[in-house]
Image: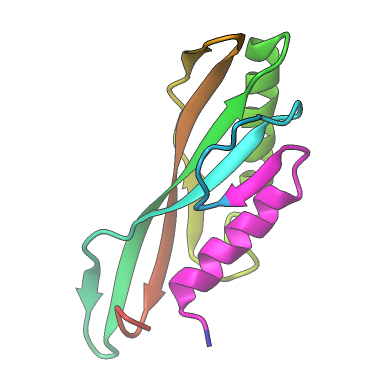
Amino acid sequence: MPTPRETILAALHTRLAALPATALRGEVLPERVPTEGLLILRDGEPGAPEVTLSPLRYHYQHRAEIEAVVQCGDRDAAFDTLCASIGGTLAADRTLDGLCDWVEAEAPRPVDLPVEGAASLKAAVIPVVLHYSTADPLA
């Protein structure tokens, strides 16, 4: 049986996979970026939880990351569209069907990355904070 953390990350990946861009989880950047863009979900860091007693609960603000990458003619517009679609997907269901308390993305910091012999990439890491609680930090 998967842990709450894994269940939440899998649900987030499923939401990203519904977008037009190719969505991967924990993969390396492929040699070619699809024309509609690429998203790579990184599991990130759960951080130190706040703990409450009676009942014992560990409250996390888990920081996952989405790497968003585009490589096409109008990179700025494509990147903006891709980021907006991520924001819209998260805003549509801030609890991932009740699996967590709240999901919130932070603003990306885009960079242009030159590629020798090809069009440059526009990419950013988009931090996503997942608020959830568990009864055991390993469960």
**Magenta stretch prevailing secondary structure:** helix
The range drawn in magenta is 2-24
- Can you see residue 92? no
Query: In the picture shown, does residue 66 fall above or below 71?
Result: below
- Tell me which residue sits at (47%, 76%) in the image: 4
Say which of 98 and 20 sits in front.
20
Give x and y (percent) for residue 88: 68, 39
Query: In the picture shown, does residue 75 fall above or below 6?
Result: above
State the image quarter where residue 19 is shown: top right
- Tell me which residue sits at (71%, 15%) in the image: 72
Whether residue 69 is in magenta: the answer is no
Q: Count how many numbered circles sit on residues in the image.
A: 0
Give x and y (percent) for residue 1: 53, 88
Query: In the picture shown, does residue 91 fall above or below 12?
Result: above
- Tell me which residue sits at (51%, 81%) in the image: 2
Say which of 72 and 124 sits in front.
72
Residue at the extreme front of the image, as rendered: 117
Give x and y (percent) for residue 33: 66, 29
Give x and y (percent) for residue 73: 73, 9
Q: Quadrant of the C terminus?
A: bottom left
Query: In the picture shown, does residue 27 fall above or below 82?
Result: below
Whether residue 13 is in magenta: the answer is yes
State the image quarter where residue 43 is shown: bottom left
Specify how the rendered protein is coloured. rainbow
- Can you see residue 49? yes
